[in-house]
Amino acid sequence: MSLLTLLILAAVVATVVSLFMGVSAMATGHDVGHRSSDQWMFMRVGLQGTALLLLILALLTK
């Protein structure tokens, strides 16, 4: 496994974790939970972008 493959896998796992954390924070009925879910979902979007850029980089280098 190359370093790029490991980085892609780490980005995908981090994206999935942030998705579940955001959904679980959203499920709470408190204002703090909703603010926290916004932060988790913002992080998810960034991680998805990172994973996508790494995938494009991997395709271009092959």
Image (cartoon, rainbow, N blue to C red):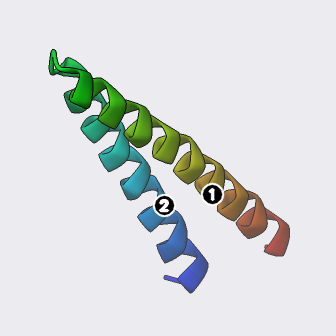
Work out whether residue 42 or residue 17 is closer to the camera in this orientation and state it.
42
Q: Name the quadrant containing residue 4.
A: bottom right
The residue carrying pointer 1 sits among few (fewer than 14), some (14 to 19) or many (20 or more) residues within 10 Å by Cα, namely some
Q: Amino acid at mark 1?
A: Thr
Query: CB atoms at circles 1 and 2 under 8 Å apart?
Result: yes
Q: Residue at x 30, y 48 (%)?
A: 17
Left or right side of 52 for 18: left
Residue that carries the numbered disc 2 in the rendered image: 11
The local secondary structure at tag 2 comes to helix
Q: Residue at x 72, y 58 (%)?
A: 53
Q: Point out residue 1 in the picture as x, y percentages from the top left corner.
A: 49, 82
Work out whether residue 39 or residue 10 is closer to the camera in this orientation and state it.
39
Q: Point out residue 5 in the picture as x, y percentages from the top left corner.
A: 54, 73
Q: Point out residue 7 in the picture as x, y percentages from the top left corner.
A: 52, 73
Left or right side of 52 for 36: left
Residue that carries the numbered disc 1 in the rendered image: 50
Q: Residue furthest right?
A: 60
The local secondary structure at tag 1 comes to helix
Work out whether residue 28 or residue 3 is closer to the camera in this orientation and state it.
28
Left or right side of 51 for 13: left
Q: CA distance from mark 1 to mark 2?
A: 7 Å
The residue carrying pointer 2 sits among few (fewer than 14), some (14 to 19) or many (20 or more) residues within 10 Å by Cα, namely many
